[in-house]
Image (cartoon, grey):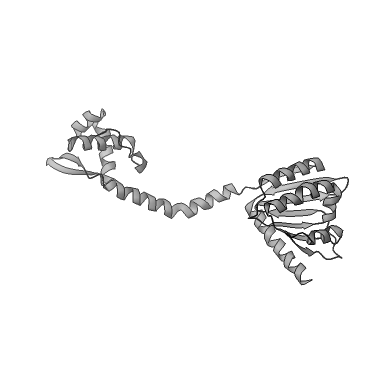
Amino acid sequence: MTNHVPIGFLGLSGRAIGVYRALLLNGHAKVRDIARACGCVRQLVYEALGELEGKGLVVRSPIGKNRYEYRPASPSILVDIAKQQTSAVESMMPKLMELYQSQVDVPTFRFYSGWNAIRSYWREFGEAKMTAEIVDETISATEDWYAADHTFMENFWEPNKLKKGVKTKLLASHGWVAEKQRERKHYEVRMLPKNKPFHGDITIYGDTVHYLALEKENQHMAVVVSAQIARSMHELFDIVWEAARMS
């Protein structure tokens, strides 16, 4: 029988594990014999035996006045201990996950200035992040995009979305670009009110929100990654989307 039984995962101290192994090897023993086998003083053996008794892993039998002999309980008890620990962890899991998520969803923020930096970001994002499983939700003055870089839009952005099967729900300002997007099969387009001009672009994709200002001389983009913020923006988009359908 090996002297290296891997039971440390059950929450026992190293000393208690050593004492239990010694008892498994010897069958039964007095404290002095256990101390000799483990190479530690009796006081520490008593502490370990108390720990093992608390787990039901040791049985104590009297052999005289205030004198006892100890024998190991069946290792099958370890299965019950493991089940109890699993149950305890499962009961704590909702609270633990809540604490974990509160840290995981700390928003990250990035800022890009100039069209070259913005275009590089969108190329990387489009290639690495966009999939058919997530709908692209955008509120946009679409002509600003095309004014910034018509070639990028027609030669990469739209073909990449079409190739990946990415669906887009677009709330657009009135103009020729919005009409052009209506013709694309992967777009569903609704129009913003003519008397409420919108400048820039807000794109919500998964847990990422993009805010773009694409004026001719000042082109900036802020990117926020946060499931909580993205969820709020999805809800806001749905409100405007439904309002656009009614108009």
Image quadrant where residue 179 sits: bottom right
Observer able to see residue 89: yes
User: Image quadrant for the N terminus?
Assistant: top left
User: Image quadrant for the C terminus?
Assistant: bottom right
Who's the residue at 81% across and 53% down the image?
Answer: 200
Residue sitting nearer the eye, 45 or 173: 173
Q: Is residue 72 left or right of residue 165?
A: left
User: Residue 56 appears at what percent x and percent y?
Assistant: 26, 47
Q: Is residue 30 left or right of residue 54?
A: left
61 above or below 138? above
User: Residue 149 appears at what percent x and percent y?
Assistant: 84, 47
User: Residue 229 appears at what percent x and percent y?
Assistant: 66, 54
Q: Residue furthest right?
A: 217
87 above or below 68? below
User: Residue 123 appears at what percent x and percent y?
Assistant: 73, 44
The count of marks equals: 0
Residue sitting nearer the eye, 217 or 13: 217
Who's the residue at 65% across and 54% down the image?
Answer: 132
Q: Residue furthest bottom?
A: 246
Who's the residue at 86% across and 50% down the image?
Answer: 147
Observer able to see residue 114: no
Image quadrant where residue 35 sits: top left
